[in-house]
Image (cartoon, rainbow, N blue to C red):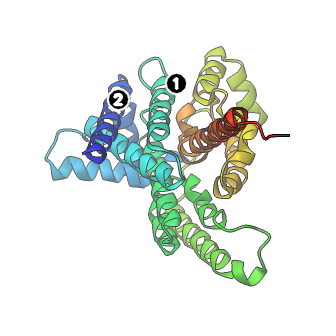
């Protein structure tokens, strides 16, 4: 019965979190519909035209249920259920206790909710939520020893968003770098195969659709960064989305398990550099993958282990203090 109660509490937290994020996923200007229609009609600009999976999924569900428009609200709710459920299972595999895992779900809910809605700078972002779902599913495969699924998973994920290119690092992060080369042969080969599959699918999509220059003003490099800094709201929402978590992650890095340590260095710095350099600073949903996959579990695991160590040390001191004195 206690086990049943724990499962019920976890399910309740996941459902409440999903309702909260879904309620914040407002789209008053119908940008989600416009983006989907542009991609399906082949008029989406670079890069949206080359991220067709989420758009075609939305239209497919619309036709399946004979709706007047894609069921964006229902899709967001299901996305949240998958995202938070996968995060819960992955965090448990990483050794977080159940209560700490639920704190992690709540933290993700709050950070995500801040970025959405009429006041948030992030768009409806079907593809970004799906991106995080694919990464968490990949992490679950790797943690359970099913790395062979990663090439197949990335073939689908790369059609959703090109940021899936980091997914093979999940395989590499499972193995220490100081091992003999022969023991690393399998993960290196498997990761290489996954990258080749991703490259093949990515190029095939570009060849199929052809060139699609952006129709709106775009920025890149220092222009994008300076453009974002010129808008105070962008910086505020970036700080709100990221918070102090990356700094905390670095502070507790040595307390986290090696898999998370290696994954942090393989994914987080480059992910932040690319997105700060090539996207609007305030769109915090773009950092959902590193937050959900690496930073949040790493911070919580590090703090959990530090607390456990402090309690253990305190118990040792208390036991020593209460022990009867030895006769001289």
- For residue 116, what is the image quadrant? top left
Residue tagged 2: 30
Looking at the picture, does residue 285 appear above or below residue 47? above
User: CB atoms at circles 1 and 2 under 8 Å apart?
Assistant: no
Residue 285: x and y in percent read: 52, 35
Relative to 1, is 199 above or below?
below
Of labels 1 and 2, earlier in sequence is: 2
Label 1 and label 2: CA atoms lie apart by 14 Å
Disc 1 target residue: 121
Q: Position of residue 99 (x, y in %)?
A: 45, 37
Give residue 137's position: percent from left, percent from top. 45, 57
Most foreground residue, 142 or 256: 256
Residue at figure coordinates x 66%, y 17% from the top left: 231
Residue lying furthest left: 66
Q: From the viewer's side, name the closer residue of 242 and 57.
A: 242
Task: Report helix, strand or loop for mark 1.
Answer: loop
Q: Which quarter of the rendered picture does the C terminus lie within?
A: top right
Closer to the eye: label 1 or 2: 1
Q: Which mark is residue 32?
A: none
């Amino acid at each position: 019965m206690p086990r049943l109660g724990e499962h019920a509490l976890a399910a309740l937290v996941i459902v409440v979190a999903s309702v909260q994020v879904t309620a914040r996923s407002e789209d008053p200007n119908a940008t989600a519909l416009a983006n989907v229609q542009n991609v399906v009609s082949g008029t989406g600009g670079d890069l949206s035209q080359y991220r067709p999976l989420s758009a075609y999924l939305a239209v497919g569900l619309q036709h399946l249920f004979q709706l007047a428009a894609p069921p964006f609200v229902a899709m967001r709710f299901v996305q949240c259920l998958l995202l938070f459920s996968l995060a819960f299972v992955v965090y448990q595999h990483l050794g977080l206790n159940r209560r700490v895992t639920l704190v992690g779900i709540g933290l993700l809910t709050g950070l995500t909710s801040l970025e959405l809605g009429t006041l948030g700078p992030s768009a409806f972002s079907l593809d970004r939520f799906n991106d995080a779902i694919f990464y968490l599913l990949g992490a679950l495969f790797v943690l359970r020893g099913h790395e062979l699924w990663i090439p197949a998973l990335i073939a689908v994920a790369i059609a959703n968003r090109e940021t899936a290119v980091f997914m093979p690092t999940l395989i590499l992060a499972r193995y220490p770098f100081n091992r003999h080369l022969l023991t690393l042969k399998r993960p290196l080969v498997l990761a290489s195969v996954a990258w080749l599959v991703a490259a093949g699918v990515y190029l095939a999509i570009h060849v199929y659709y052809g060139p699609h220059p952006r129709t709106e003003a775009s920025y890149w490099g220092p222009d994008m960064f300076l453009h974002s800094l010129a808008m105070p709201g962008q910086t505020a929402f970036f700080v709100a989305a990221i918070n102090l978590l990356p700094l905390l992650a670095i502070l507790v890095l040595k307390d986290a398990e090696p898999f998370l340590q290696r994954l942090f260095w393989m994914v987080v710095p480059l992910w932040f550099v690319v997105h700060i350099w090539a996207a609007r600073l305030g769109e915090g949903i773009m950092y959902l993958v590193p937050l959900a996959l690496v930073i949040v579990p790493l911070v919580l695991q590090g703090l959990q282990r530090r607390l456990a160590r402090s309690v253990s040390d305190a118990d040792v001191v208390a036991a020593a203090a209460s022990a009867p004195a030895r006769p001289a």
